[in-house]
Image: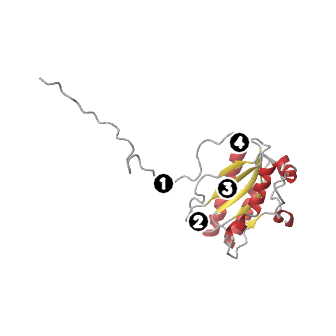
Amino acid sequence: MKPLQLELPTWGGRRKGAGRKRKGPVRLVSHRARPAHLARHPLHAVWRTRPDVPSLRKRAVMELLRVALAAGGSRATFRLVHYSVQGNHLHLVVEAHDKVALSRGMQGLAVRIARAVNTAAGRRGRVFADHYFARELRTPAEVRRAVRYVLDNHLHHAAGRALQADSCAAPVTAPRTWLLTVGWLKSRAGPLPVAYWSG
């Protein structure tokens, strides 16, 4: 008698179209736990809106959005210093005492912004496409570049169009970190943004 030979199925390697299919929209920002945050470091944060959300630059939206940013950006442990509003995203320069303060401050700001946008647009539902992206600014040069980028961001998006973005030149809330009050002014990264002094 010949011994029976069993052919066991084996993994055949990567194949086009194989594997579990992704459900829902592709994530724009990593959902890994955020690292610890130090109070002395300001942050540059970016929020992007969903495709079905109207432009944030519409007059009716902007009027309520400014109120929401001012109201949600001044806390004992969380401060919104500068911002720039574009059609489908916002740039923020913020300060937070620690990781918890940053999370709660941004969550509170998100709720206010979402309510403002939905009220002005007469809609319901989510406003932001994903979590916010945030990067710590650890040197005077990094802070200077970030502030200049945020205040001059409309120049990148207004090329060839008669569009003036809403950039908060004067601080929304007075900064308290050394990097945003004194340090960045001593950087050799280049001239200060004109918008900062015109505010």
Pair 3/4: label in front: 3
Spatial CA distance of label 2 from label 4 is 29 Å
Are there few (<14), some (14-19), or many (20+) residues within 10 Å of tag 4? some
Spatial CA distance of label 2 from label 3 is 16 Å
Q: Earlier in the sequence, mark 3 or mark 1?
A: 1
Are there few (<14), some (14-19), or many (20+) residues within 10 Å of tag 2? some
Q: Earlier in the sequence, mark 2 or mark 4?
A: 2
Are there few (<14), some (14-19), or many (20+) residues within 10 Å of tag 1? few
Q: Earlier in the sequence, mark 4 or mark 1?
A: 1
Q: Earlier in the sequence, mark 2 or mark 1?
A: 1
- Please state which amino acid type lies under the numbered disc 2: Val
- Considering only vertical position in the picture, is 3 above or below 129? above
Residue at (67% x, 68% y) in the render: 157
Spatial CA distance of label 4 from label 1 is 28 Å
Where does label 1 land, which residue? 24
Q: Is residue 81 visible?
A: no
Where does label 3 land, which residue? 46
Tell me if label 3 and label 1 are in contact, CB under 8 Å.
no
x and y percentages locating residue 122 in the rendered image: 60, 69
- Considering only vertical position in the picture, is 53 above or below 78? below
Spatial CA distance of label 3 from label 1 is 21 Å
Q: Which mark is residue 187?
A: none
- Please state which amino acid type lies under the numbered disc 3: Val
Pair 2/3: label in front: 3
Q: Which mark is residue 99?
A: 4
Q: Which mark is residue 53?
A: 2
x and y percentages locating residue 3 in the rendered image: 17, 24
Residue at (73% x, 62% y) in the render: 84
Q: Earlier in the sequence, mark 2 or mark 3?
A: 3
Q: Is residue 118 left or right of residue 140?
A: left
